[in-house]
């Protein structure tokens, strides 16, 4: 299986000959892409029309400006191999979806350079049927968590669920809440960070607040203040890669233990923390088949709770 290794950003006006077409059809014809690839680019927030993200079914007009991140050279990405994942807990399962509590050190799906365990491989090893929608290496994946982030993650089992849940995440109809322990004390104690995110200009493995990046909105509220850190309840309005980590670093309150984004290694070592203190604690959305509300909660795992206990004892 292949996956883009880098992206080629294009900003072009829509020609007259494509006036009135659906966005996915227009992209397909303009750049010589398959309809599936065009739709995937739209659903992964890689396309904007006149600066705005729009649905793949939206009709576009001649003269509109398209900002598109096209796939770059392809490199091999293995399809997920069934592999048991210790600590991967299934908290909900039906014919349409499965919700798991992901442990640390597990990726959502295979990707370039990652040879460790994955959620998709773990579910396959446990005998769970997953939707065949999406690229082969990430079939059924409607949202992701970083390898170093624990918590709740939904995976589609039916094709209907995949389509409905992808739309729900894109349309911001899913309540995603995280517990984040950050350095210092944010001022104000509750607020919103509205800052665009894109690839870091000099470090490909990182993301950053960048002018002209993709719109990104994070809401936070301080739950508990310790001497050197604050426990936040974070709600994501958008779902960019590393969004919480990037936004909190940008306001000079990086997640404790997040050395990649400016966390203090001395503090992390003192607390015995080997990854960022970030946990996807709540996931709430309408069931993709019947619309009934589903709400899932997850407490911090043992390594993160231990850090809170240490900080509480010092306060």
Image (cartoon, rainbow, N blue to C red):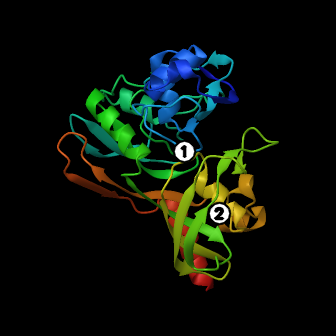
C-alpha distance separating marks 2 and 1:
24 Å
Residue at 36% of width from left, 22% of height from top?
132
Furthest-bottom residue in this view = 315
Is 146 positioned to the left or the right of 94 in the image?
right
Query: Which residue occupies the foreground of this view, 224 or 106?
Result: 224
Do callouts 2 and 1 mark residues in contact (Cβ within 8 Å)? no
Locate residue 127, reporting x and y percent: 30, 27
In the visual, does 298 lie left or right of 197?
Answer: left
Residue 315 against residue 25 in the figure, above or below: below
x%, y% of residue 25?
46, 21
Residue behind mark 1: 52
Q: What percent of the width, then of the height, locates residue 276? A: 62, 57
Quick one: label 2 or label 1, which is nearer the N terminus?
Answer: 1
Q: Which quadrant is home to the N terminus?
A: top right
Q: Is residue 238 left or right of residue 13?
A: left
Q: Is residue 137 visible?
A: no
How many discs mark residues in the rendered view? 2
User: Mark 2, residues whose alpha carbon is within 10 Å: few (<14), some, or many (≥20)?
Assistant: many
Q: Is residue 250 visible?
A: yes
Label 1: state its secondary structure: loop
Question: Residue sitting at 49 percent across and 37 percent down?
Answer: 108
Name the residue at 59% across, 31% down: 63
Decide which of 92, 293 is in the foreground and name it. Answer: 293
Image quarter in which the C terminus is found: bottom right
- The crowd level at tag 1 (other Cα within 10 Å; few <14, some 14-19, many 20+) is few
Q: List the residue tagged with mark 2.
A: 248
Instruction: Give the residue drawn at x 53%, y 69%.
Output: 220
């Amino acid at each position: 299986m292949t996956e883009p290794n880098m992206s080629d950003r294009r900003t072009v006006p829509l020609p007259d000959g494509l006036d009135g077409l659906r966005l996915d059809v227009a992209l397909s014809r303009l750049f010589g892409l398959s309809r599936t690839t065009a739709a995937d680019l739209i659903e992964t927030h890689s396309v904007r029309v006149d600066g705005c993200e729009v649905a793949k079914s939206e009709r576009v007009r001649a003269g509109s400006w398209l900002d598109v991140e096209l796939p770059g050279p392809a490199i091999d990405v293995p399809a997920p191999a069934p592999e048991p994942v210790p600590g991967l807990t299934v908290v909900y399962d039906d014919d349409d979806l499965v919700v798991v509590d992901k442990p640390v050190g597990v990726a959502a799906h295979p990707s370039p350079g990652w040879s460790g365990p994955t959620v998709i491989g773990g579910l396959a090893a446990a005998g769970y049927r997953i939707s065949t929608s999406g690229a082969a290496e990430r079939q059924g994946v409607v949202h992701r968590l970083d390898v170093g982030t624990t918590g709740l993650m939904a995976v589609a089992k039916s094709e209907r669920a995949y389509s409905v849940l992808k739309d729900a995440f894109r349309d911001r109809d899913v309540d995603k809440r995280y517990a984040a322990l950050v350095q210092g004390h944010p001022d104000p104690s509750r607020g919103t960070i509205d800052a665009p995110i894109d690839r870091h200009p000099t470090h490909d493995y990182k993301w950053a607040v960048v002018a002209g990046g993709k719109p990104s909105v994070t809401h936070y509220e301080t739950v508990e203040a310790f001497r050197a850190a604050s426990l936040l309840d974070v709600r994501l309005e958008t779902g960019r890669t590393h969004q919480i980590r990037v936004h909190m670093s940008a306001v000079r309150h990086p997640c404790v233990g997040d050395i990649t984004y400016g966390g203090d290694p001395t503090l992390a070592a003192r607390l015995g923390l080997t990854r960022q203190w970030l946990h996807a604690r709540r996931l709430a959305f309408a069931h993709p088949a019947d619309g009934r509300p589903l709400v899932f909660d997850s407490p911090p795992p043992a390594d993160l709770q231990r850090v809170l206990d240490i900080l509480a004892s010092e306060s």
